[in-house]
Image (cartoon, grey):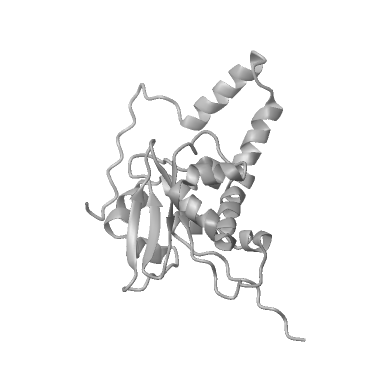
Amino acid sequence: MTDETPAQPHPHPHAHPPADVRAAALEALLVDKELIGTDTVDAVVDELEHLGPLHGARVVARAWVDPTYRERLLADATAAAAELGIGGLEGEHVVAVENTDEVHNVVVCTLCSCYPWPLLGIPPVWYKSPPYRARVVGEPRAVLREFGLEVPDEVEVRVWDSSAEIRYLVVPRRPSGSDDLDEDALAALVTRDSMIGVGLPDAPATPLLA
């Protein structure tokens, strides 16, 4: 694999319209036939765009505070997420990989953009981009550095390639200084990028001195 961005194919005169145009046309057809309502579509979009990463954060926070749940999550992430009422299409076969002092995990889909939607919502644009998909496998440390994440040389970086059969969730390390936080406060620290592996959870706020 080289560092070069793969060449893009030339547009074909009979190429299909963009995915967003096809999706809008399909939505209009379903609404016109009264198979779904626009409120249903809006609710699904809101769920994926705004609530998606919050679901994954709940799973991670529960793993941080409950060792037995953490074991179940690492053994069967799909079932563990279902314990919290989280699941559905694109989340049927999820594997959780845990960051440790020795290993840092990062996720990619080299073929397209396979992603655990019920846990993380809609994938970010950069996750679907050819440069990320091509480079993170061959030079993961350099890519992570561009995200502002410097992984020490002594820490192994493992890259997991998602597919239609398996999608991955990174369980980031719990931030230092968060021992006194409850589960809800911990979930607020978990970022989408930390569950992909290109970032870290937020640090807890430092208490103001009296």
Q: Specify the farthest residue to the right.
A: 210
Location of residue 148 with respect to 122 vertically, above or below:
below
Location of residue 35 with respect to 128 vertically, above or below:
above
Number of numbered discs on residues: 0
Quarter holding the C terminus is: bottom right
Rendered location of residue 143, percent (x, y): 36, 61
Q: Quadrant of residue 85?
A: top right
Q: Quadrant of residue 150?
A: bottom left
**117 horizontally vs 102: left or right:** right
Rendered location of residue 120, percent (x, y): 54, 47
Residue drawn at the location 64% of the way across and 60% of the way down: 188
Q: Specify the farthest residue to the front.
A: 68
Q: Specify the farthest residue to the bottom.
A: 210
Residue drawn at the location 33% of the way across and 40% of the way down: 111
**92 horizontally vs 138: left or right:** right
Location of residue 165 with respect to 108 vertically, above or below:
above
Can the viewer see residue 121? no
Rendered location of residue 146, percent (x, y): 40, 64
Between 58 and 73, the one nearer to me in the picture: 73
Can the viewer see residue 160? yes
Residue drawn at the location 59% of the way across and 62% of the way down: 65
**193 horizontally vs 186: left or right:** left
Q: Specify the farthest residue to the top.
A: 33
Rendered location of residue 99, percent (x, y): 43, 62
Location of residue 140 with respect to 205 vertically, above or below:
above
Q: Quadrant of residue 159?
A: bottom left
